[in-house]
């Protein structure tokens, strides 16, 4: 063994240290396998590679990594003189940048949206396309919006078909007011001052806008009630209530055509009862009635229309209003309106339809000025008819009437209006004073022969 390394081949001899090993030619040598510079092939090899002792059967090598490739591929160096593959500069001006592409895309989208919206609107307008549904889906209606029959809206819906507009042509022009259907065969109740001065002919405009001619059946100037009849059958009459059963504070609706505004409904309450009224135009008859006072809005044109209670029953005929305007000016609503009680209006209507005229209820006495009692209360009787109702109850001239059915008297108008409120044959209680004595009497009212 020497100081170099000993490499022995089976059957061969050693090589001195520092000398090239078998299969490697000396440095600088040009020996080739054919020249004998390389040692003989290994007996384990065959083929062209058998000439090198460094190579063996790689697949049979026990030290070989089984996961290593069977061959190592080494890229071939480019041939001298060949050009390298060209590389494009990403920042070159010839290629659009990212922000340019985004800007182009955004502008294109805006233009497309604008054009699409314009074309969609044109097609929708011209083609009648369905527009989007606005608002949330409908839920169940709240209680106040359901309008039950007993609500004010339900009452108005039920009564309005029976309310009409009345027009009468006269010498001074056309008079317009309201009315309501009292019978299925066409009788309509209105105010006397609506048809007064006319030719006896009128026209009626119904709730649905249709019209019909009418004639005046009869009128009572002193009670301000008139009856006309339209040429139409199968009409829907109103339901009558009881005006004597009213109480202050009861809710009411006033219906009619104020200021030519047909089918108008206003709401209020009964603000007073038995408010005695004395009305009339200069030179005309004086009208007396114990009215229902209400704060429901009533204006010119409401005359003759119905005043309805919360159950939809007519309890009065709207007739007049109080106002603060000067003489000659048209009055407007200030919350003080008056209606003729329906019990009185219905009775007069039946008289007019049955006989062509109304009966007037009287007590059989003439009234003077206010009484001379304490505080000036009461109405003094100036004269008593010998065979009249007052005389039959024992009343005498000079007696002071203090109350009629519990209603205090203070003016002659009070006694006249309250007596006419009742039907002939009604029995009323009269409290009176004779001298210093207070007494009561039951008086049976009668009808005056006109």
Image: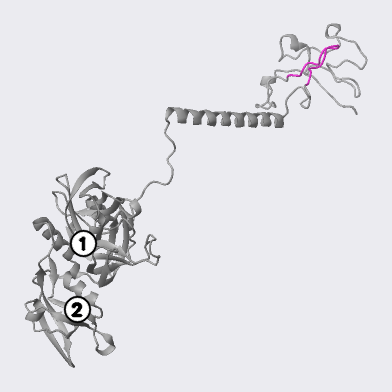
The answer to which of 416 and 281 lies nearer the viewer is 281
Residue neighbourhood size for the residue with mark 1, other residues' Cα within 10 Å, grouped as few (<14), some (14–19), many (≥20): some
Q: Residue furthest front?
A: 283
The residue that disc 1 covers is 221
Is residue 50 rendered to the left or right of residue 409? right
Q: Write down the quadrant of residue 21 in the picture.
A: top right
**Magenta range:** 73-87
Label 2 SS: strand
Task: Residue at 73%, 20% (x, y): give it.
Answer: 72
Task: Residue at 31%, 51% (x, y): give it.
Answer: 172
| Image quadrant occupied by the N terminus | top right
Q: Residue furthest right?
A: 28
Label 1 SS: loop
Is residue 406 rendered to the left or right of residue 50? left
Looking at the image, how many numbered discs can be counted on the residues? 2
115 to 235, vertically: above or below = above
The disc, 2 or 1, on the residue closer to the chain's N-terminal end is 1
Q: Residue furthest bottom?
A: 436
Is residue 252 rendered to the left or right of residue 27? left
């Amino acid at each position: 063994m020497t100081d170099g390394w000993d490499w022995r081949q089976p059957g061969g001899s050693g090589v001195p240290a520092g000398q090239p090993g078998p299969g490697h030619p000396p440095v600088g040598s040009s020996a080739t396998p054919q020249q004998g510079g390389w040692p003989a092939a290994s007996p384990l090899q065959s083929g062209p590679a058998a000439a090198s002792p460094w190579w063996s059967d790689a697949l049979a090598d026990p030290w070989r990594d089984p996961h290593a490739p069977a061959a190592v591929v080494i890229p071939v160096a480019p041939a001298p003189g060949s050009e390298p593959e060209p590389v494009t500069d990403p920042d070159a001006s010839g290629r659009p940048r990212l922000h340019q592409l985004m800007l182009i895309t955004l502008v294109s989208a805006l233009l497309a949206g604008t054009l699409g919206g314009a074309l969609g609107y044109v097609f929708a307008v011209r083609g009648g396309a369905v527009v989007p549904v606005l608002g949330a889906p409908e839920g169940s209606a709240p209680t106040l919006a359901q309008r039950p029959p007993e609500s004010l809206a339900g009452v108005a819906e039920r009564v309005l078909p029976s309310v009409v507009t009345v027009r009468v042509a006269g010498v001074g022009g056309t008079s317009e007011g309201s009315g309501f259907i009292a019978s299925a065969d066409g009788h309509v109740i209105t105010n006397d001052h609506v048809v007064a001065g006319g030719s006896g002919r009128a026209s009626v405009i119904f709730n649905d806008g249709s019209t019909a001619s009418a004639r005046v059946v009869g009128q009572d100037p002193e009670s301000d009630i008139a009856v006309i009849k339209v040429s139409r059958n199968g009409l829907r009459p109103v339901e009558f209530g009881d005006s004597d059963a009213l109480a202050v504070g009861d809710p009411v609706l006033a219906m009619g055509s104020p200021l030519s505004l047909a089918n108008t409904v206003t709401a209020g309450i009964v603000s007073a009862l038995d408010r005695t009224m004395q009305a009339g135009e200069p030179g005309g008859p004086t009208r007396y009635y114990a009215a229902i006072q209400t704060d429901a809005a009533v204006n010119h044109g409401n005359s003759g229309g119905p005043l309805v209670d919360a159950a939809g029953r007519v309890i009065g005929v709207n007739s007049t209003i109080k106002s603060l305007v000067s003489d000659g000016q048209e009055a407007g609503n200030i919350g003080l309106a008056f209606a003729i009680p329906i019990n009185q209006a219905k009775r007069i209507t039946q008289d007019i339809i049955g006989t062509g005229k109304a009966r007037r209820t009287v007590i059989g006495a003439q009234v003077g000025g206010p009484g001379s009692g304490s505080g000036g209360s009461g109405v003094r009787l100036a004269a008593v008819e010998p065979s009249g109702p007052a005389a039959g109850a024992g009343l005498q001239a000079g007696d002071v009437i203090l109350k009629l059915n519990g209603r205090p008297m203070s003016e002659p108008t009070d006694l006249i209006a309250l007596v006419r409120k009742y039907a002939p044959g009604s029995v009323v209680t009269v409290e009176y004073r004779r001298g210093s004595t207070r007494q009561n009497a039951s008086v049976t009212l009668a009808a005056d022969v006109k």
